[in-house]
Image (spheres, rainbow, N blue to C red):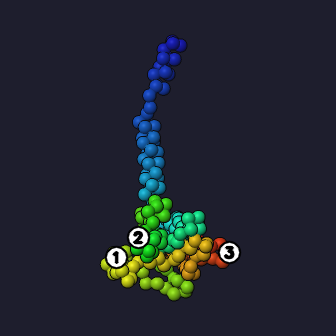
Amino acid sequence: MGVRAVAGAQKSQSGFTLIEILVVIVIVAVLSTFVTLTLNFRNVSKTVNDEALRLGLQMQMASDQAIYTRQQFGVRFHPETYEFYQLMASEDGDATWEIVDNEQMAYRPSDEELEYQVDIEGIAIVLETLEEEREAVTEEEPIKPHVLFLSNGEIMPDFRVVVADSTAEFRQMIYSGEIEPIVVEALE
């Protein structure tokens, strides 16, 4: 009788009950829901902050590159993008601003729609789209940067760039500082 009791006990303990399987399915469903929500959640504040920091570092890189290569660099802003330029000597002796062909200094679109606002020496600049500017380009009026990074280390003129999301709820400011050449900070 002792052998049958042990065999019966082993038989009832092998396998899972229906309730145990349902509990596991519910736990997996809840966890997968949290993972899905986390992956699809857009953190607009972080996107604006990251873009402002990236732009500030790109501007610092342009300034450093101007010093090291003894060439002039600049950045021009549009409502939703920006471009870095380099002053290049042409064959006829004139100098023209050409877009920098450097992946590190190129604009990278983000998942969020971002907007740029620019003040030059305290005066708000009306930004045109890149397409509008290219249509208006003439030899007498070529596209020129808003902010210059000179080979002597100077950044001019004094500027303030605001990076904001489309609702302007989250905003970061990049500006020319007195101690640090380029400062990035949050606007409230």
Mark 2 or mark 1: which comes first in sequence? 2
Q: Are marks 3 and 1 in contact (CB under 8 Å)?
A: no
Q: Position of residue 139 (x, y in %)?
A: 36, 80
Of badges 3 and 2, nearer the viewer stands 2
Quadrant in the picture for residue 136? bottom left
Quarter of the figure that contains the C terminus: bottom right
Q: Position of residue 186 (x, y in %)?
A: 58, 73
Residue at 52% over, 77% down: 147
Element under label 1? helix
Please rate how many residues cluster around mark 2, counting C-alpha atoms within 10 Å: few if below 14, some from 14 to 19, many from 20.
Answer: few
Q: Kindly identify the amino acid type of the residue bearing the numbered disc 2.
A: Glu
Please rate how many residues cluster around mark 1, counting C-alpha atoms within 10 Å: few if below 14, some from 14 to 19, many from 20.
Answer: few
Does the rendering let one see residue 74? yes
Residue at 41% over, 70% down: 91
Q: How many marks?
A: 3
Residue under numbered circle 3: 179
| Residue 168 sits above or below residue 23 on the image | below
| Residue 115 sits above or below residue 34 on the image | below
Residue at 58% over, 71% down: 151
The outermost residue toward the right is 179
Q: Kindly identify the amino acid type of the residue bearing the numbered disc 1.
A: Arg
Element under label 2? loop
> Which mark, by number, is residue 134?
1
Residue under numbered circle 2: 91
> Which mark, by number, is residue 117?
none
